[in-house]
Image (spheres, rainbow, N blue to C red):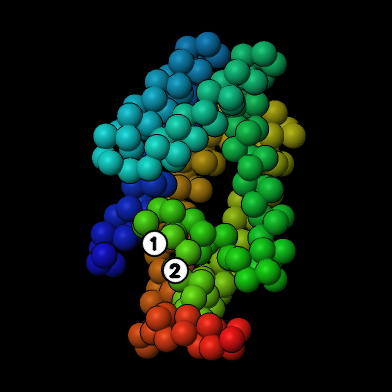
């Protein structure tokens, strides 16, 4: 898979994730009607889910993304607070940020896991020391940046500034995530310039166990 295709997939994933927020934020900002805004967010989440499924991708990301938006809509409808639309994703992101240092110590960088799912590579990268190191370094860059973004969204949520949360997501987080994806890919490419013979690595491990 070429670098261009990988970058296109990463950008597409970022855009698909932002689509429900775009629908919710624009409709709520222009109408101030929460039910209508929730409908718009759910409609775009459904469109994204169908598109992901028809593109022969895994059913889990398609269903998971829609379920997350549906859960957010249900919580918001029950509370009547627009800021709660962002709560489930915010909790998920904060949890990943907090768990990342532990996963790095265990040599399971979340960026590597995400890349394996997104690009269909599975866990093959874990058998290659160079790739494992590259994902670990890239993950350190990610967790610092993502931690700062999440901290700001938590601040806005506690202040009940729903529109500011939506605007920050679309105008700041989306561009930052695109640039971050490019930066992490550059780091990965530089640290994996030399080919890694994963088959040889596996044979060495098997030899050590015998």
For image coordinates 38% across by 77% down, the residue present is 189
- In this view, 22 is above or below 130: above
Count of numbered circles on the image = 2
- Given residues 164 and 183, the one toward you in this image is 183
Q: Which quarter of the figure has residue 105?
A: bottom right
**In this orientation, does residue 199 appear?**
yes
For image coordinates 65% across by 26% down, the residue present is 84
* Residue 121 circle label: 1
For image coordinates 40% across by 37% down, the residue present is 59
Contact between marks 2 and 1 (CB within 8 A): the answer is: yes
SS at mark 1? loop
Q: Mark 1: give few (<14), some (14-19) or many (20+) Cα within 10 Å.
A: few
- In this view, 160 is above or below 106: above
Between the residue at mark 2 and the residue at mark 1, the CA separation in whole angstroms equals 6 Å
Return the x and y of residue 186 as percentages of the image width and height: 40, 73
Return the x and y of residue 142 as percentages of the image width and height: 56, 63
Side (left or right) of 87 relative to 112: right
* Residue 124 circle label: 2
**In this orientation, does residue 25 appear?**
no
For image coordinates 42% across by 80% down, the residue present is 198
Work out which quarter of the rendered image holds the N terminus and state it: bottom left
- Given residues 192 and 97, the one toward you in this image is 192
- In this view, 106 is above or below 157: below
């Amino acid at each position: 898979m070429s670098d261009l295709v990988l970058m296109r997939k990463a950008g597409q994933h970022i855009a698909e994730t932002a689509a429900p927020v775009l629908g919710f934020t624009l409709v709520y900002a222009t109408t101030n009607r929460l039910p209508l805004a929730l409908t718009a967010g759910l409609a775009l989440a459904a469109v994204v889910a169908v598109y992901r499924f028809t593109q022969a991708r895994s059913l889990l990301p398609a269903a998971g993304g829609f379920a997350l938006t549906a859960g957010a809509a249900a919580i918001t409808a029950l509370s009547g607070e627009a800021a709660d639309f962002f709560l489930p994703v915010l909790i998920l992101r904060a949890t990943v940020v907090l768990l990342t240092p532990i996963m790095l110590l265990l040599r399971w960088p979340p960026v590597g896991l995400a890349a394996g799912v997104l690009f269909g590579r599975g866990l093959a990268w874990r058998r290659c020391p160079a790739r494992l190191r590259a994902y670990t370094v890239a993950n350190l860059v990610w967790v610092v940046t993502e931690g700062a973004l999440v901290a700001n969204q938590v601040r806005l949520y506690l202040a009940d500034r729903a529109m500011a949360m939506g605007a920050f997501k679309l105008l700041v987080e989306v561009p930052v995530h695109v640039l971050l994806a490019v930066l992490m890919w550059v780091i990965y490419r530089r640290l994996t310039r030399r080919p890694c013979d994963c088959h040889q690595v596996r044979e060495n491990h098997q030899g050590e166990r015998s």
